[in-house]
């Protein structure tokens, strides 16, 4: 197998972090919907918290993405 | 760019799609729109929508076929992780630095313009530009107060400046220039400023002793982990912004690459999300997280 093929496989594995992030974001959004359904007057507060939580959760996926990009763009040369 | 003569079949396809498109749009204009309460309202509306879709689709196909006969050299998909470098006065400078200088210059001119022409004319009841500015400043002030816990004009104005700079670089992207936020060194420098602010405000509010004590709370054994998570803050902030911005850039480039000559209209709609909405959300998150971390550092623990 060539080097570029191995790099491609590694990049593919790196972006698998998206699965965990997706799971986490789905759970968080579901809980937020539940919370709003239970207490509609706390809508804005829950919204702000959810946005912050989603940003932190999403960062795992972003790390995987950045790792994959760095692998593709710097290791191939 | 060179024009290559299309084959006869292609000419026929171009002419056919043009005729169908214009015909559908013409037919659409012929169908009269009845009143909402009248009998054939729904049927006429459906017909008009269908003809509109057919016309636009045919015209889009025609434009794609015409543009496809221009050869733009070999099209390959290339995205560089670091922006191009250029020589200015003998120094090798990253293009994102130059773009940032341009954005800063434009923002400074705008700010001076506002200061000398708009501010003296401000009235008691805000209208137009004054309303926009007052809303923006009020929003940043509120966010700072909410996250930081106290009124702090300096912090609010710093984050307002950062927001303006981010907004400027998002507008630059709409002109087709690579925005400076897709440069890791650029986002890392913003994140580093946040890191410095966290420590400066933490020491300013609690003193050096208090700041160091916050690492050993509640138990001394977690000090290394707290130190590590503090050091991870600038890296995570920088990588988050950089990854999101570069991701948007790559997706838009991929769309252009995949559509080829047919990239009329569709990239504009998708670009509205990837170039306008998505960056704004990310900038808001960057500012929000920075303020949250600073607020955490100055928090009083009983």
Image: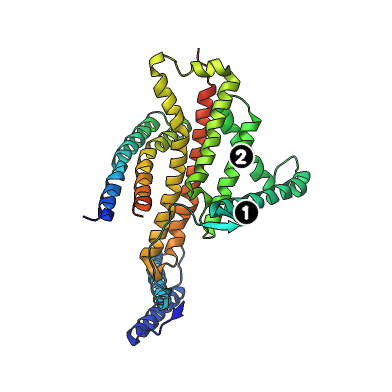
- Name the N-terminal-most of marks 1 and 2: 1
Please, which chain is the residue tagged with disc 1 on?
Answer: B
Q: Image height check: is B288 above or below B56?
A: above
Which label was assigned to residue B102? 1
Q: Chain of mark 2?
A: B
Q: Is residue A41 left or right of residue A38?
A: right
- Respond whether the residues carrying marks 1 and 2 are from the same subunit: yes
The image shows residue B128 at horizontal and vertical percentages of 68, 48
Residue, far bottom: B8
**Does residue B136 appear anywhere in the picture?**
yes
Task: Characterize the local packing of mark 2: few (<14), some (14-19) or many (20 or more) Cα atoms within 10 angstroms.
Answer: some
Q: Which residue is mark 2?
A: B160
Instruction: For residue B43, say whether it is visible.
Output: no
Please determine whether, in this image, residue B105 is positioned above or below residue B213.
Answer: below
Residue ranking furthest to the front:
B90
What is the secondary structure assignment of the residue under circle 1?
helix
Q: Nearer the viewer, residue B132 or B163?
A: B163
Q: CA distance from mark 1 to mark 2?
A: 18 Å
Residue B248 image position (x, y, % from top left): 43, 52
- The image shows residue A36, relative to residue B126, as above or below, that is above
Q: Helix or strand or loop: what does disc 2 sit on?
A: helix
Circle nearer the viewer, 1 or 2: 1
Q: Are marks 1 and 2 in contact (CB under 8 Å)?
A: no
> Which quarter of the figure has residue B193?
top right
Query: How is this picture coloured?
Result: rainbow
């Amino acid at each position: 197998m060539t080097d570029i093929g191995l790099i491609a496989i590694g990049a593919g594995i790196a972006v698998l972090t998206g699965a965990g992030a997706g799971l986490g974001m789905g759970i968080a959004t579901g809980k937020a919907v539940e919370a709003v359904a239970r207490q509609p007057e706390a809508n804005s507060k829950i919204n702000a918290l959810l946005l912050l939580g989603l940003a932190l959760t999403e960062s795992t996926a972003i790390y995987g993405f950045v790792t994959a990009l760095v692998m593709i763009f710097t290791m191939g040369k | 760019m060179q024009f290559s003569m299309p084959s006869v079949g292609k000419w026929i396809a171009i002419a056919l799609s043009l005729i169908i498109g214009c015909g559908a749009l013409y037919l659409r204009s012929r169908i009269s729109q009845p009143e909402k309460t009248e009998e054939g309202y729904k049927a006429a509306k459906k017909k008009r929508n269908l003809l509109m879709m057919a016309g636009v689709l045919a015209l889009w196909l025609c434009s794609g076929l015409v543009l496809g006969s221009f050869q733009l050299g070999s099209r390959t998909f290339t995205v560089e992780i670091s922006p191009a470098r250029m020589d200015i006065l003998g120094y090798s400078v990253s293009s994102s630095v130059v773009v940032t200088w341009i954005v800063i210059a434009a923002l400074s001119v705008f700010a001076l313009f506002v200061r000398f022409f708009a501010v003296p004319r401000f009235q008691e009841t805000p209208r137009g530009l004054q309303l926009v500015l007052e809303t923006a400043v009020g929003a940043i002030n509120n966010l700072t107060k909410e996250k930081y816990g106290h009124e702090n004009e300096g912090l609010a104005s710093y984050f307002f400046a950062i927001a303006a700079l981010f907004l400027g670089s998002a507008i630059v992207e709409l002109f087709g220039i690579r925005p400076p936020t897709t440069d890791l060194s650029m986002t890392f420098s913003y994140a580093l400023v946040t890191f410095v602010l966290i420590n400066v405000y933490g020491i300013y509010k609690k003193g050096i002793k208090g700041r160091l004590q916050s690492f050993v709370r509640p138990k001394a054994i977690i000090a290394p982990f707290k130190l590590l998570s503090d050091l991870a803050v600038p890296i995570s902030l920088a990588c988050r912004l950089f990854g999101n911005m570069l991701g948007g850039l790559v997706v838009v480039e991929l769309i252009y690459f995949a559509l080829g000559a047919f990239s009329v209209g569709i990239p504009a709609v998708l670009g509205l999300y990837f170039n306008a909405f998505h960056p704004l959300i990310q900038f808001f998150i960057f500012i929000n997280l920075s303020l949250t971390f600073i607020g955490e550092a100055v928090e009083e623990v009983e």
